Amino acid sequence: MRDSLFHVERDRTATLQAQIREMLVTAMLAGQLPASSPIPSTRVMAKRLAVSRNTVMIAYQALAADGYLIARERSGFYVSPEIHAGIAVPNRLKSTNGSEQPSQIEWAGKFAIRPTRQSNIVKPNNWQSYPYPFIYGQADAALFPITAWRDCTRQAMSRKWLEAWTEDRFTEDDPMLIEQIRQRVLMRRGILAAPDEILITLGAQNALYLLGNLLVKPETKVAIEDPGYPDMRNIFSILSDNIHPVPVDDEGIRVDQLGDAQVVFVTPSHQFPTNATMSLRRRRELLSWATENDALIIEDDYEYETNYSGEPTPALKSLDGSGRVLYIGSLSKSLMPGLRMGFVTGPAELIAEVRALRRLVLRHPPGNNQRVAALFLSLGRHDSLIGRLHRAYSKRWQTLGTALQKHFPDWAQTPGFGGTSYWVRGPEGLNGNLLASKALEEGVLIEPGDIYFHDPIGRQNYFRLGFSSIPDERIEPGIERLAQVATRMG
C-alpha cells in the first residue's frame, strides 16, 4: 500500500486516533487494503504520520476490538478476512469523538447529462460460456491470424520502425496507415481521398461521437433510421432536442420523410439492423435531397467486407460529388473489436476540425497500434484475413438462413448484402424480451429487437441473431433449441 494513503490533519476537530481509524477503515472498505493483508507496523505508521507510537497502537487495538483488524503475535496487525461480511458499512464513517464527517455529494444535481439512463443493448460479459451465442459484434478469435499479427508487432518494435510510433505526433496519424487505408480500403469502396481528408479514430463509435459533437447543436434537426443503431440515437439525443426517426423499407431510409432535417445518419450497404441494402435509385434520391436542403449525410459503412452477394456495392460516398457525405469505416470488425481502429473521411476543412476536436479528447490514437495495423495491411495480411472471414461467415450465413427457414419459416429474409446477422420478425404477440430470457436459460443468446426502435412500444416481436462468434456446426442445433423455447411460450 502506498504511503500516500496515510496522512492526518492536525487542524481537524477529530482526534489523531479517530483520524487513523477512519483512514484505515476507509482503505479497507474500498479494497485498497485487501482482506488478510498486513497493515504497516505501529512503528512505521507512527513515523509516517509523525505521531507517537502509542497513538497508533491505541487506534489499532480499537480496530481489532471492532473486528476490522486481527492481531497476530510477533507478526503484527492484519485486515480481517471477514471485512466485507457481517460488518456494517456506514455511508460516511463517524469519528470516535462523535462528530459527523461532511455529508455525501448529491450528484444528481451536478450531472449535465445522464448516459446511464439511456436504453442500450445489453450482452452478458461471459457470452463465451454459452453454447449458442447468437450475438452481434463479437469476432471469432479462431479465425484471426495471430502469428501474422505477432510478426507485424515484432516488426513495429524493430529499430527501423521505432520512431514511427514512439514519438508524440500531437494531432497527426501514422502516414503509412493513412496511405494503406487510401489504397486498400477506400479505393475498393469507390472512394478517392487525399491524406488530409482522412482521420484515424478509436473505432467507428469514436468517429460518430466526434462528428456528432462537431455538427449537431441543440436546435439541429437530426434524422435517424428507425429501426436503427441505438448508440447513434443516444449520441444525438445528448446533443439535440430535435431527433427525427425515419422509417426504412427494402430500399433503405425513406427519403420522402426526411423533411427539413439538417443531418441524417444512414447505413446504406446493409441497414442496421434490418440488413436492407439501399438501392441505387434511393441513393441518388438521398444525395439530391441533401443538396436541395443543404444537409449533411453521415454514412456508417460498417462490415463493408462482408458482402456475400457477389455483386459489388460501392459506398454512398463514392457517388457524392459535393462533399456532403461524411464516410465512417472501421477495421475493428475485420481485425478484432478490442483493437478499436476506425476512420472518418470527408472534406479537408471538416477533417481539420475533427482532428482538433480529437486532440481535446485523446490527442491521437496509440501510435503503436497504428503502425502494426499499417504493416498488417501493407503485407497483404488484412486481405488474406478478409478472405478467410468471407469464407467462414458466408457459410454460417447460409447455414443460419436454412435453419431459420426450417424452424422459423417466413420469420426472416436472407440479407441480400450479407453482414453477420439476421433480422427476425416474429408473429404479433411474440415478446422478444421474454423469448431472449427463456432462451438464455437454455444456453441460447439472442438480442431482443425493440431496443433498435425509437419508440419500442409494440415492437416486441422482433429479435436479432448474430453469427460471427458461433461455429457453423452449432447454428442449426441452437436455432432448433430456440424454436423449442418459442413453441413452449405459445
Image: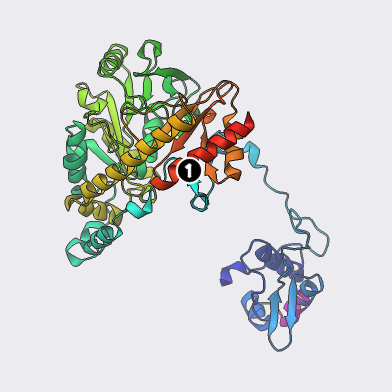
Q: Which residues are magenta?
A: 52-60
Position in image of residue 154 (x %, y %): 25, 64
Q: How is the image coloured?
A: rainbow
Query: Residue sitting at 58 percent across and 72 percent down?
Result: 1
Q: Is residue 57 magenta?
A: yes
Q: Amino acid at mark 1?
A: Pro
Query: Residue sitting at 61 percent across and 39 percent down?
Result: 438
Above or below residue 84? Residue 198 is above
The one nearer the camera, 259 or 239, is 259
Look at mark 1 in the image and give the residue it sits on.
Answer: 477
Which residue is at the far bottom? 74
The one nearer the camera, 376 or 462, is 462
**Label 1: few (<14), some (14–19) or many (≥20) C-alpha neighbours in 10 Å:** some
What's the magenta bit mostly, secondary-structure-wise?
helix
> Is there any visible trace of residue 221 in the rendered image?
no
Which residue is at the far right? 98
- Left or right of 473? Residue 107 is right
Q: Quadrant of residue 43?
A: bottom right
Q: Is residue 159 magenta?
A: no
Position in image of residue 81 (x %, y %): 70, 71
Position in image of residue 482 (x %, y %): 54, 38
The one nearer the camera, 414 or 297, is 414
